[in-house]
Structures are given as structure tokens and as C-alpha cells.
Image (cartoon, helix red, strand yellow):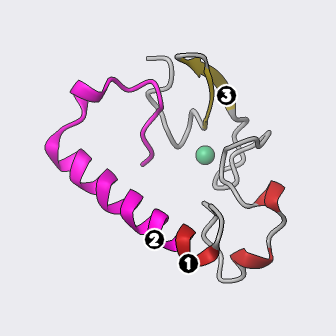
Amino acid sequence: MGMPPTRPAQSVTAAEFAQLWARLQAMMTRAVADGRIITVDSADRLALPEGESRRVYKQERCRDCGTPVVLGAIEGRTTYACPRCQPEWGG
Ligand SMILES: [Zn+2]
């Protein structure tokens, strides 16, 4: 289950943080090896066009579940989230 970008940091439990940190480390390690950030899990991910290489970022629909992506703003930065995969959006 994903975590919404609106989730206050102080509400993240130690177990959730450990899981998030491990996932981020794996993603960043893969991004360095790939030479770009690709969040779609696919064996042929390097062949994906830039516009199709991310699950929710700049997508109309979540690439995992097809739910329309919700845009928001946090500290002036546009955020993208799937309300189904990241269910606390706006909550
Ligand atoms: Zn989704």
C-alpha cells in the first residue's frame, strides 16, 4: 500500500519508515543503475518512453490500478497521487 504525499511525517510509524526507507534506497539504487527514475516495475523498463515510466507522476491514471491520478500542491510543489493506492489522500 502506498503512502499519500499529504501524510504528516510525525504520523509515520517506525515500521512504516523502515519499509519506506528500504523501498527508497532500492529505487534510488536502481535509478542510478538505469540512469533515470523509472517507477514502473517491468523487466523491459529501460525501453519505456519517459512519459510511461512512472506510476503516477504526470500520469492521467495510475499505472498500477487505472484510477484517475489526483493532483495537489505541497509547499508550492505539484504532487501526484493515486487515491486508491495511496488511500489517505486529503484525509
Ligand atoms: Zn493506483
Q: In this view, does 79 lie to the left or right of 25?
A: right
**Rendered location of residue 15, percent (x, y):** 17, 49
* Residue count near mark 3 (Cα–Cα under 10 Å), binned few <14, some 14–19, many ≥20: some
Magenta stretch secondary structure, dominant:
helix
| Of labels 1 and 3, the one closer to you | 1
Q: Give the numbered dot on residue 33.
A: 1
| Of labels 3 and 2, the one closer to you | 2
Q: Quadrant of the C terminus?
A: top left
- The amino acid type, in three-letter code, at marker 1 is Ala
**Rendered location of residue 55, percent (x, y):** 65, 52
Residue lying at 37% horizontally and 63% vertically, measured from the top left: 25
Residue lying at 60% horizontally and 60% vertically, measured from the top left: 39
In the foreground, 79 or 87: 79
Circle 2 sits on which residue?
A: 29
- Mark 1–mark 2 distance (CA, rounded to whole Å): 6 Å
Q: Are marks 1 and 3 in contact (CB under 8 Å)?
A: no
- The amino acid type, in three-letter code, at marker 3 is Val
Circle 3 sits on which residue?
A: 70
- Tag 2, which secondary structure? helix
Q: Which of marks 1 and 3 is nearer the N terminus?
A: 1
- Tag 1, which secondary structure? helix
Residue lying at 18% horizontally and 38% vertically, measured from the top left: 13
Q: Quadrant of residue 70?
A: top right
Q: Which of marks 3 and 2 is nearer the N terminus?
A: 2
Residue lying at 59% horizontally and 35% vertically, measured from the top left: 81
- The amino acid type, in three-letter code, at marker 2 is Thr
- Extent of the magenta region: 1-30
**Rendered location of residue 12, percent (x, y):** 24, 34
- Where 28 sits versus 89, above or below? below
